[in-house]
Amino acid sequence: MVNASISGETTLGGKHRIAKALKQHNPAIVIVELGANDGLRGNKLADTEANLDVIITHSLNSDANVLLVGMQLPPNYGATYTAAFRDIFVRLARKHRILLLPFLLEGVNPVQFQRDNLHPTDDAQQRIMLNVLQELKHLLH
């Protein structure tokens, strides 16, 4: 297992790094969990979706199975933007016929978030791991 993430990364950064990471590590499974920082920055949704599409396509073309991990935005971004953001993940999972974990932080207790109410604390990691494993188990042989 290789954690190729970078804190604060956007889908654009992931798009620029994916080819090298795939070549370097030759993974059997790629977990794509990007997009939250795009949404929090108010980036254009079409750009976020296009970047994720490239990441997924490169991963599939390298013969890796892909698990797409969806993210959600806080309600203060407005109902239209938050719904459209959430739909990106559903659309891409359907398009590429890949597994989707709809929301990484589903079921995390509100007291398990840092003061910003966005980032989970260490206490939330067990719940997050279980969320990922629920979908990842379908790709493990």
Image (tube, rainbow, N blue to C red):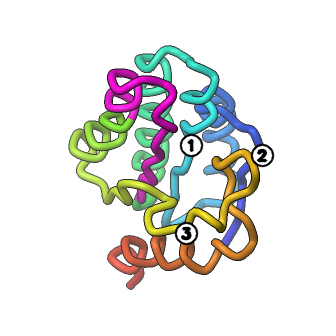
The residue at the point 42 percent across, 73 percent down is: 136
Distance from disc 2 to disc 1, alpha carbons, whole Å, reads 10 Å
Picture layout, residue 65 above or below residue 124: above
Picture layout, residue 17 above or below residue 108: above
User: Which residue corresponds to mark 2?
Assistant: 7
In magenta segment, residue 27: no
Q: Nearer the viewer, mark 3 or mark 1?
A: 3
Picture layout, residue 48 above or below residue 110: above
Q: Nearer the viewer, residue 136 or 61?
A: 136
Q: Amino acid at mark 3?
A: Asn
Q: Nearer the viewer, residue 5 or 77?
A: 77
Q: Amino acid at mark 2?
A: Ser
| Badge 3 or badge 1: first in the primary sequence | 1
Q: Which residues are magenta?
A: 66-85
Expressed as whole percent of the image width and height from the top left, the position of residue 106 reads 44, 63
Q: Amino acid at mark 1?
A: Leu
User: Which residue corresponds to mark 3?
Assistant: 109
The residue at the point 56 percent across, 17 percent down is: 43
Expressed as whole percent of the image width and height from the top left, the position of residue 141 reads 38, 85
Q: Nearer the viewer, mark 2 or mark 3?
A: 3
